[in-house]
Amino acid sequence: MKNLIVANWKCNPTTLKEAKQLFDSIKKSAKNIKKSEVVLCPPFVFLKELSFFKKGSLVFFKLGAQNCFWEKFGAYTGEISLPMLRDLGCEYVIVGHSERRKYFGETNEIVNKKLKAIIDAKLTAILCVGETQEQRNNGETEKVLKEQIIKAIKNISCSKFHVSNVCIAYEPVWAIGTNNPCDHEEAQKMGLLIRKIISEIYSRPVSQKFRLIYGGSVKGDNAAGYIKEAGLNGLLVGGASLDPKEFLGTIKSIE
Ligand code: 13P
């Protein structure tokens, strides 16, 4: 199984010109990437151009979206559906990111609807879960992760979860954009806990097979430990993915 390295550009950059420059610098300096599957998730508005930019050149990476809507089409002002994303060349979709939960009121129930829709659209979901600092201080980490996962995969069968290659991203909220990454030992512990939760819901074999990645202040100098020491299967990179040098350093450190 290849490591999954996902670049979440969030609401950056502000112009198409900058987006193309960023894409181009990553493309130019990324050579001989063998052990990683790299997914770039730019804002929606850049997807079309970047997928066009990607066509015809021997680019190693895939495109993903940062969010989606669960209905296929209709009178839903402002929403972007999964058939639209697929048409733009997206293969991955991030769902349940803590910033969506915090700023846009996404509940576990909404995450569940989106996750089901992503699976039905035959795209690959990156389901984000993670506790806040306050929840961690109160000893609620396990409870929060359990609730987020159980509710997100409600009514999704074991075989559907397995066949659709759902990936879970452990993203502790306190580590996001803080320069205070979760240390490798703790990330390993949390990874085992998430696999245990999946094992209790589905089965042990399924719990061992899905990809589990880490996100939260990942950079070139701490990336390798999440794979080599914590035994995780990849990374979800925010801030550092906007700096081609740092992002490439992150990928190369685990190659
Ligand atoms: P940072 O890498 O900026 O901490 O962001 C992590 C993240 O939220 C990725 O989805």
Image (cartoon, helix red, strand yellow):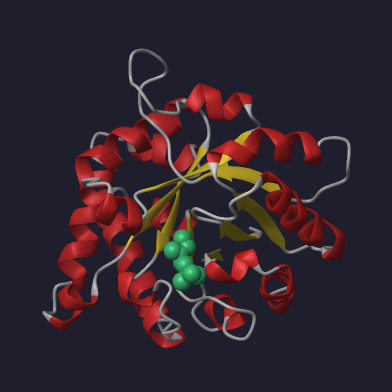
Residue farthest to the left, as pictured: 138
103 or 224: which is nearer to us? 103
The answer to which image quadrant residue 137 occupies is bottom left
The answer to which image quadrant residue 228 occupies is bottom right
The quarter of the image holding the C terminus is bottom right
Task: Give the residue displayed 42% in from the left and 18% down from the top.
Answer: 72
| Image side of residue 23 versus residue 2, left or right | right
Point out residue 45 in the picture as x, y percentages from the top left corner.
58, 37
109 or 101: which is nearer to us? 101
The answer to which image quadrant residue 47 occupies is top right
Point out residue 146 in the picture as x, y percentages from the top left corner.
21, 59
Q: Is residue 59 visible?
A: yes
Task: Give the residue displayed 53% in from the left and 75% down from the top.
Answer: 218
| Image side of residue 233 versus residue 68, left or right | right
Vertical arrangement, residue 136 with respect to residue 111, above or below: below
The quarter of the image holding the N terminus is bottom right
Q: Is residue 215 visible?
A: no
Point out residue 198 in the picture as x, y percentages from the top left corner.
31, 55
In the rendered picture of this protein, how many numbered marks are placed on residues? 0
Residue farthest to the top, as pictured: 74
| Image side of residue 55 versus residue 168, left or right | right
Task: Give the residue displayed 59% in from the left and 71% down from the top.
Answer: 240
Point out residue 88 in the picture as x, y percentages from the top left corner.
63, 29
197 or 173: which is nearer to us? 173
